Amino acid sequence: MTTQPVALEATDDIDLADRLKAGRARVMEELHKLIVGQEDVIEQVLLSLFVGGNSLIVGVPGLAKTLLIHTIAQVLDLKFSRIQFTPDLMPSDITGTDLVQEDPDTGQRRMAFMPGPVFANIILADEINRTPPKTQAALLEAMQEHRVTVQGRTYELEEPFFVFATQNPIELEGTYPLPEAQLDRFMFNIIMDYLPHDEEMQVVRSTTAIQSHTFEHAVTGADIVAFQQLVRKVPVSDPVLKYAVDLARTSRPIEDGSPEFIKKWVSYGASVRAAQYLILGAKARALMNGQYHVHFDDIRALAHPVLRHRILTNFHAESEQITTEYLIDQLLDTVPTPKSGM
């Protein structure tokens, strides 16, 4: 096993890496003033922020998805906007629109742009699968480009900018599932599940009493932007990079040498974005843990949230009740770790 040299040699980079690690701890501490448990969920949300990615959060109603994202915005002192997606929501309801306004001094009328709720730092797109594709696309342009186009004019969105979209897995009637190409734009598919008994007791006790919370802003929006640049400087050895790419490629049934269980149960495997987000997420995870380089374990830890919405099962998998989670477990068991590297 070889040792990856530290590449973050500049004093400013080392100081910023220390601030990222300390900031992560402070943010977690502030969040837990209001949020009980959900450690893995919070970590994946923070990884999204430090990378600059957008994520999908899936969970049944009542698990505090909205509360979590709103609280993170408060802790970071960022502008928060919640958009409730409904079948009658129009693209202009998200982006904003031009309205006729009268100048009180001259009495002349002119067109003025009125920004929509997308003009914020953290957007919660609640039940994104309940609105038609045309409206979904308006948000996805903002996610991808960090800008919106209205009446032929382009408006830049303020940085940092993130979208966290939620889906309800139990009410599928009247929904418009996101196409695979649009799902692929989300860095993580974060599963939010029920809390253990003791933590649920704590939630019920605290939320049925008088609540008063103030948050310290240990990390700012400018810090987040700086962290995103730092993450991309973290070195990755060739064996670790190869491992991430191999995980994505092995999930595709069309690849030569893909395992039999992939050919049997998978229609489409992960795209190149999967490997990109595995590496970016692993870089951020390494920094959060006080490391200056990426380990194989960082890749493995993020395989499920990165791959679960990118591996599409076929009819045979559904008939045999084979889940994507099971297939990812099999991939992690099947894809060998390169002999050299970290």
Image (spheres, helix red, strand yellow):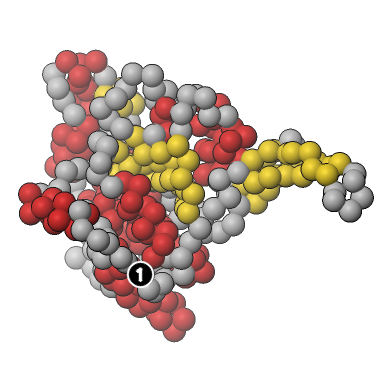
Q: Which quadrant would the C terminus be assigned to in this image?
A: bottom left
User: Dot 1 lies on which element?
Assistant: loop
Residue drawn at x 19%, y 21% is 317
Q: Is residue 338 left or right of residue 51?
A: left
Residue drawn at x 90%, y 44% is 108
Q: Vertically, is 116 above or below 202?
A: above
Mark 1 surroundings: few (<14), some (14-19) or many (≥20) residues within 10 A: few
Q: Residue furthest bottom?
A: 11
Q: Residue furthest left?
A: 197
Viewer can see residue 198: yes
Instruction: Residue type at mark 1: give it.
Output: Thr
Say which of 31 and 150 sits in front. 31
Residue beneath disc 1: 214
Q: Which quadrant would the N terminus be assigned to in this image?
A: bottom left
Say which of 84 and 297 sits in front. 84
Q: Vertically, is 92 above or below 195?
A: above
Residue drawn at x 42%, y 59% is 73
